[in-house]
Image (cartoon, grey):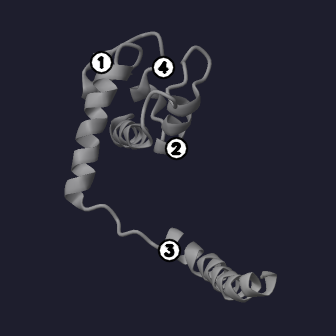
Amino acid sequence: MLAAIDRVLAPVTWIAAAFVVAVMLIGPELVGADKPPPTPKAAAATAASGKELFTADCGGCHTLADAGTSGTTGPNLDDAAPDAAAVKNYVRGGAGAMPAFGDQLANAEIDAVAAYVASVAGG
């Protein structure tokens, strides 16, 4: 009886092992594949949503001329002129009196706000 079970399971085990090896060899290529750059239309949509999010969620504390906000609790972003990476870090993790928003905003929303602020701050 055990010999019959072994005859059935042995090929299944080898097939499963081969599948795992194939996934381990091919998987990283698929995960790390180059993605095409966003189209200008997508970039414009991101900037527009970034402005809307900034005005609604950030403008009460931060001044940013392009958004028409004049908050005084946080830094004046026109003067600070942060880059997108800095904005993402502050929004996700907070700093000083600024609370973290990483749990409340989706990554796409944080990216949109960061891209918007970086594109208009300081200019």
Dot 2 amino acid type = Ala
The residue singled out by tag 3 in the image is: 30
Q: CA distance from mark 1 to mark 3?
A: 43 Å
Answer with mark 1 or mark 4, whichever residue precedes in sequence: 1
Can I make out residue 103 in this image? yes
The label nearer to you, 2 versus 3, is 3
Answer with mark 2 or mark 1, whichever residue precedes in sequence: 1
The residue singled out by tag 1 in the image is: 69
Say which element carries label 3: helix
- Residue 107 lies left or right of residue 116; in this view the side is right
Dot 3 amino acid type = Leu
Q: CA distance from mark 4 to mark 2?
A: 16 Å
Residue 121 in the image, given as x and y percentages of width and height: 37, 34
The residue singled out by tag 2 in the image is: 85
Answer with mark 4 or mark 3, whichever residue precedes in sequence: 3
The residue singled out by tag 4 in the image is: 75
Quadrant in the picture for the N terminus: bottom right
